[in-house]
Amino acid sequence: MPVSRLSAQIQIVLIVLAMGCGSQAGRATPDGLVEATAAQATASLPPRLTIDRLMNPTTRVQLNGRVVQFSLHALIHFNDLTELFAYIDKQAGRWQFETPGDRQAFGNDLLQRGVESRIVSMETELPLEVVLTHTRAELEQAVARIRTPDTPLVFKGVNWQLPATTYRDAFLRVRERWKVSLNCWSASSSLPGRVLSNWFLIDEGIQLFGATYDSTEHFWQAVKFHPDVTVADLHALLGDFSSTDWAPWLGALERDQRFYFGNGYVVEFLKNNLQRERLTWFEAELTKSARPVEHARAAQQRTGRQPGDPIRFPAVEEKVLWGDLADIFHLVVAFSNRPGIALSGDVGRVRDALVKHSFDAIYLPGYAGGRFPFLSQQYRDLMLEIWKVKYLQMPRFGEVIRSTAGMKLDHFLDDGDSPDIPIPVYVGQLNRIRELALAQSAAR
């Protein structure tokens, strides 16, 4: 049976089961599957996502029976835009602003980011497809047809309000950006978009600073660990983290308005990852993934694997296990001595242990003197250096990046950022390496 037909029939079976209809709801096919009637299948599906439904703030986009959420800072989740509006209104009342106009502008910025996360989803491209396959005029007309309890406003809160023109412009802004941009990430529907992701597996391996890695992501995360740090050291540090009360320190960071506005993703990242259950998860995953005597950086390097062989750590593990763990350690050191924020004895003790295990900097012989700060331009520029190997020295990747000439190379993931290399810096360097690849080809 063709895969597409099997997949479609399995989906119909799941629909029948979800409706509680049992075997009497349809008829048996020659393949032994139950086939629902067209009316039953259609009745169980959510309405198609039209331009009017997408513009409607109450609409919840669904995929396989599940609501597709969107985010601010990648970690604050929403089911529909009305939830986003309420959050924005609360945040606009939380902070101090010099003028009402500044408060309104703050809310408008959160709106733009939330709308973009709703449309440029990490789970489905359908919202973006709807926006890009309708004209600007059609989008404007759909917004004009919206009726809410606050009409002629789309939303009227205690601290922030949303005129229809501001709402419309947020969608138009996304449309203008993504009709000329290529989102370079591992699940892109575009082949170049996937290949240009750091997560793309390099089956022959890539040589970087004296070691071989399965992808540029493997190098980027591995280098955050000093070569001498062992997995046993990480377990000991996690034990210290789990016995520490992080709430006072996190609360002080969160209340610092200037710091939060400049580092919102970092604060939300730490709040999420310093929870006891999350630290327990890191412990369990490390236990499953590596032996205590192994060195953390070396464990992430490629040793003994031939092209086609299974890889030890997929790129997603590199990010959510090794990378997130290292980021937590580096960020605690970087922000534990902020002016005006007193350290409890436990937090100070953990910070000292992190410094002892060299989470006070990035250590890489042969680059920037061998030691440079985690939050530094030297570290951000290291991304360009490893891309010079991938795109200027490996012909197959050079061809792919040159094939994207005429498009802006871009990167957007659920309104997330990155503490090690901010997204705007990442995007700038991605377009810069393409310029170098095009110049290299023209010189030949």
Image (tube, grey):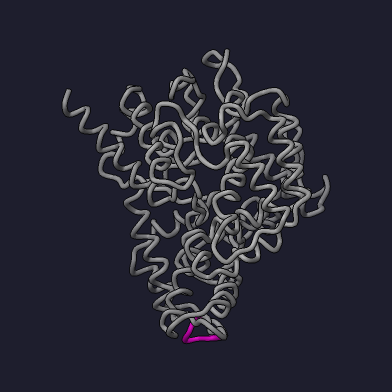
Which segment is the magenta one? 150-154
Tell me if residue 49 is in the magenta stretch. Answer: no
State the residue at coordinates (55%, 20%).
302
Q: Residue at x 47, y 86 (%)?
A: 152
Q: Residue 20 in the image: x percent, y percent?
A: 82, 53
Name the main secondary structure of what is drawn in magenta: loop
Compared with 68, 397 (above or below) is above
Q: Position of residue 441 (x, y in %)?
A: 21, 27
Question: Residue, x 49% and y 28% (percent of image)?
Answer: 215
Q: Is residue 174 left or right of residue 442?
A: right
Q: Quadrant of the C terminus?
A: top left
- The quarter of the picture where residue 409 lies is top left
The answer to whether any part of residue 139 appears in the image is yes
Quarter of the image with the N terminus is top right
Indicate the quadrant where residue 385 lies.
top left
Find residue 5 and report its horizontal and vertical position in percent.
61, 35
Name the residue: 66% across, 61% down: 249
Can you give x and y, in whole percent of width and height, for residue 68 in the image?
61, 56
Furthest-left residue in this view: 443
Q: Is residue 147 visible?
A: no
Above or below, 342 against 378 in this view is below
